[in-house]
Image (tube, rainbow, N blue to C red):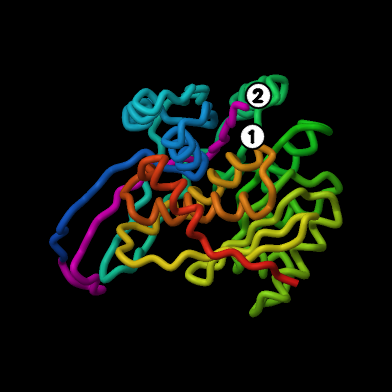
Amino acid sequence: MKIATLTVNPAIDETIHLKKLERGHVHRAEEARFNAGGKGINVAACLADFSVKTAVTGFLGNANSRLFEELFQSHHIEDRFIRYEGETRTNIKIVDEGETTDINLQGVSPTVEEISKLQNIVDDFVAEGALIVMSGSLPPKMDPRFYRNEVERAGKGAKIIVDCSGKALQELLKAEKLPLAIKPNIDELSAFSGQKLENEGEVLNIARSLIERGMKLVAVSMGEKGGLFVSREGAIHAQYSLSGVKSTVGAGDAMVAGIAKSISDNAKLEDIARLGTAFAVGKLQKFGPALPEKTIIENLAQKVECRQVG
């Protein structure tokens, strides 16, 4: 099954490594990297590294699209991005003492005509029976109901995973028709629920309420505490302890990629939890939108600690 990803607000990620970030001081960078970024693009790159047939769409500025095009070509990813006049935004990530400080620009808002073109491409993917991953922030002035509207517009039978936050997530989860799966982190799920979720039981209750409304999977990432994967099969907590983290950038997107691959294979809940976690752990060991070799990921999946919850 083809997996297609949608990224309406991609970015060039400029990652700068410092010894220590101090406000008001001049710093000399130890290293700087430029990568094609955006949540859906990260998902697609991870899937391609795992030998999954992948397509991408969204909006790209034609003035600085080279990094993206090189990534798509090198990973054999089908490029269905719509180009606009201008530049794709640049996000700055400052890494010091094992922590990352993000400075994200807003991006360029698409026109009504560009959104219509994008919807036609999404329709093509739905008609092909592709599993579609919609993820990332929305550009300024874009309707926060965009993901909600696309899920509803795709209709019954469309296979859509959504990974978003803020108002876009709030609107998505208000709808009668929900996506196949979501992957919020615990803070994003707390914002949706209107209460600070502080323990596994509270997270489980909110996740189960979404499953009861028709969602297939709710995967909640909880940082170093692992992830909680909930479906009608039950609930599983998955965790893998790792030292030697190279970059946390894109780990959540890698988890979405592992989840998407598992769902496309009709995997059982524990296997979804294992592969999603293994993708995320593998990403922690690599810079940029990339995974280790497929055999390494498969071995990691077998070593993920899983336990039944509730």
**What is the x, y in percent for residue 62?**
39, 25
Q: Can you tell which mark lies on residue 58? A: none
Measured as percent of width and height from the top left, residue 17 is found at 23, 59
Q: Is residue 221 shown above or below 250?
A: below
In which quadrant will I find the C terminus?
bottom right
Q: Is residue 241 above or below residue 44?
A: below
Residue 9 lies in magenta, yes or no?
A: yes
- Residue 53 vs residue 31: left or right? right
In the image, 10 versus 290, the foreground residue is 290
Q: Residues within 10 Å of mark 1 (few under 14, many from 20)?
A: many
Q: Circle 2 is placed at which residue position?
A: 125
User: Which kind of residue does numbered mark 2 sit on?
Assistant: Phe
Please determine whether, in this image, residue 264 is positioned above or below residue 24: above
Which mark is first along the chain, 2 or 1? 2
Badge 1 vs badge 2, beta-carbon distance below 8 Å:
yes
How many numbered badges does the structure rendering display? Answer: 2
Q: Is residue 243 located in the magenta-colored stretch of the structure?
A: no
Residue range of the region highlighted in magenta in the rendering: 1-26
Q: How many neighbours does mark 2 have within 10 angstroms: few (below 14), some (14-19), or many (20 or more)? A: many
Name the residue at 86% across, 48% down.
Answer: 176
The residue located at (29%, 52%) in the rendering is 15
Q: Kindly indicate the quadrant of the structure image that contains residue 154.
A: top right
On screen, 233 above or below 22? above
Residue type, mark 1 in image: Ile
The circle drawn on residue 132 is 1
Q: CA distance from mark 1 to mark 2?
A: 7 Å
Image position, residue 280 (x, y; %): 47, 54
Residue 63 seen from this side: no
Judge left or right: residue 186 versus residue 82.
Answer: right
Is residue 306 shown to the viewer in this render?
A: yes
Q: Secondary structure at mark 1?
A: strand
